[in-house]
Image (cartoon, rainbow, N blue to C red):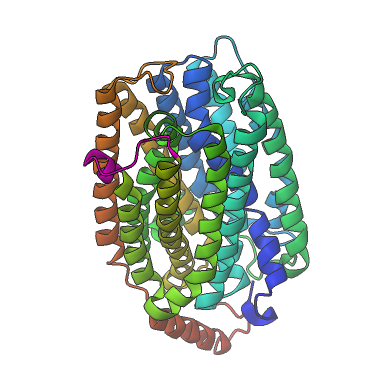
Amino acid sequence: MSAAQGPVTTRLAVFHGLGSIAYGIKDNGFSTFLLLFYNQVLGMDPRLVSLALMVALVIDGLADPLIGYMSDRTHTRWGRRLPWLYLAPIPLGFAWYMMWLPSDDPGVLQLIAVAVLVRLLLSCCEVPSVALVPELTRDYDERTTLMRYRFLFGWTGGLAIMLLAYTVFLAERPDGTNGMLSADGYHDYGLFGAVVMVVAVLVSARGQHKRVAHWPQRARSPFSLRVAFSELRESFSHPAFLILLAGGALAYTSQGITFSISNYLYLYIWRFSQADFMIYPLVLFASVVACFLALPRLHRRWGKRDTAVVTALIGAALWIVPFLLRAAGLWPQEGTSASTTALFAAFFLSNVFSVSAMISASSMVADVVEASEEHTGRRAEGAFFAGNFFMQKCATGLGIFLTGQLLYVVGLPANAKPGEVPAEVIDNLALVYVVAVATFAAAIAMVLRRFPITRADHEARVAALDAAARGDLDGTGMHP
């Protein structure tokens, strides 16, 4: 898709962003509730649950590059991406619902199978959707705008269903039973999320239909598995992309640990009440909105790369401050309003910076497309974003796996009740978590600092590619 069709309007950015709601719901469910559901509710060993989720992530991640490659090669009158966005969401909804059905004796193979199915179908929605970003515009800042809306809606979808989970589906029962530790509400949680996923992807596709529904410029050549892997290897060996993969792997491993361990931290360390769990998603949503508004100014001042480096460090530092103060005996008593209010303030500021780093890095992936095109003559939007998703999933799976091992090592018992866990277990859990977050943050900043594409580099490259296209003697508009 050429940017010659005009600038990205707010309407287009909104419809494009809507598609990420499904990813936000999936990410929230897998990272926040799934380990708790299968471990504390259904009684599975946390090591087996985390292992199953990691295996599912890796299997799905291995399929992502092929999904991206096939998306790049799809040749229909509706373009390359829309057929995927119309066909995949309905089976995705059914698979998501199946994953949250209570079972008396859940097996690890059963969990792997349904988790793989959910992730594969989600990839068939998300990879083609995000691959539209570099097609919709080649402008350095407009790509960030599209990514800002994707993250805004992705976080909104995830946080909205989290809020409903805490306040409706998994709320405390009239008899005083903790709803998060009861199987009943997870059925409704899964059904509601499935419906929202399907509607969000279909509405997003329909809203972008007029802009992207056209025959692709490049005709599809006969498919060859050898050629497919050769082209994927060529794309994934680009130095700038390798830097993003390395930095992203560190970032998403850290995020996987944080998301999958979050409910354990809030229940057993910070002693959240039911009301606290209701407010928490609102705090995170406010932080994402603040990031959405502030990020353009940061990019104008520092560019994408330096913004990602600085905000990653600040976000991690603010996140672990409450844990450090608690260890030093300088934090209010856990479970009190003073403790929770201060914690929410720290989490708000931390998430503003952490999400800024994530959006910046995601927008940097789009800029690799032209850098690769300059050398290969091919545009491989789907392949690059699929490779990025492959990295995210493997790293998130590793993070979840590490969480399971961490919980086992520190000795947190199954079916543990808040307030009844030995203090040394809680302290060890907090200590190991803080060391992990700090280590990952420093490594992320060191890697991303090496990313070579700046605003000036990108704009000069786009101008050169446009000039080459105008000078193409055979009239096809394709680059040699």
Residue at left offset 40%, top offset 55%: 350
Say left or right for 293 vs 393.
right
Residue 274 visible to the viewer: yes
Q: Quadrant of the N terminus?
A: bottom right
- Residue 392: within the magenta? no
Residue 354, above or below 327:
below
Measuring from the top left, give residue 180's x and y in whole percent: 56, 25
Please identify the dominant SS of the magenta region: loop
Report the front residue among 251 and 72: 251
Q: Which residues are magenta?
A: 323-336
Does residue 325 show up magenta in the picture? yes
Q: Quadrant of residue 300?
A: bottom left
Q: Residue furthest left?
A: 328
Quadrant in which residue 403 is drawn: top left
Q: Is residue 195 left or right of residue 364?
A: right
Q: Is residue 358 left or right of residue 276?
A: left
